[in-house]
Image: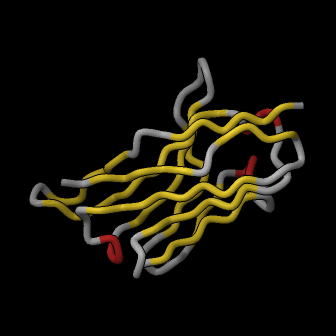
Amino acid sequence: QVQLVESGGGLVQAGGSLRLSCAASGIFFSISAVGWYRQAPGKQRELVATITRGSSTNYADPVKGRFTISRDNAKKMVYLQMNSLKPEDTAIYYCNANAMSAMGWVDYWGQGTQVTVSS
């Protein structure tokens, strides 16, 4: 059974920092691309950052220079360090893994963790 479990969300003042964590199980983590997405109220889910199995990273423009994605294959963990947070970063943050399954490459999602940035 595939599980992605996020943690680390919360309430923080603008300019503050948070570190999100995602624990993966049930997938071949080391060969999976993983990432973070977010969804604000009334908006579509959007990409925040991704990291390939080779540790190449990609960031959405609004978070470049402020957020850092990383992974630990041994622990099957993916992290998102968020610095200089802004109120517009407020959203539910979801962990994503594109992993090999019996049906081919499949996208898996966590349940999400709320990040609220106050002004």
The quarter of the rendered structure image containing the C terminus is: top right
Position of residue 65 measured from the top left corner of the image (x, y, whole percent): 80, 62
| Residue at 86% over, 40% down | 13
Figure quadrant of residue 56: bottom right
Residue 111 horizontal/vertical position (percent): 41, 39
Q: Give residue 83's position: percent from left, percent from top.
A: 80, 56
Could you say where residue 36 lies in the image, as x and y percent from the top left? 53, 52
User: Of residues 54 and 41, which is closer to you in this image?
Assistant: 41
Residue 12 to residue 1: above or below: above
86, 53: nearer the viewer: 86
In the image, residue 95 above or below residue 73: above
In the image: residue 116, left or right of residue 41: right
Please tell me in which quadrant of the rendered image residue 19 appears: bottom right
Q: Quadrant of the N terminus?
A: bottom left
Name the residue: 89% across, 48% down.
15
Query: In which quarter of the view is residue 40 placed?
Result: top right
Answer with left or right where residue 64 lies relative to residue 16: left
Please state if 57 lies on the left or on the right of 26 as rendered.
Answer: right
Residue at the image position 42 percent from the left and 61 percent from the top: 23
Q: State how many labels appear.
A: 0
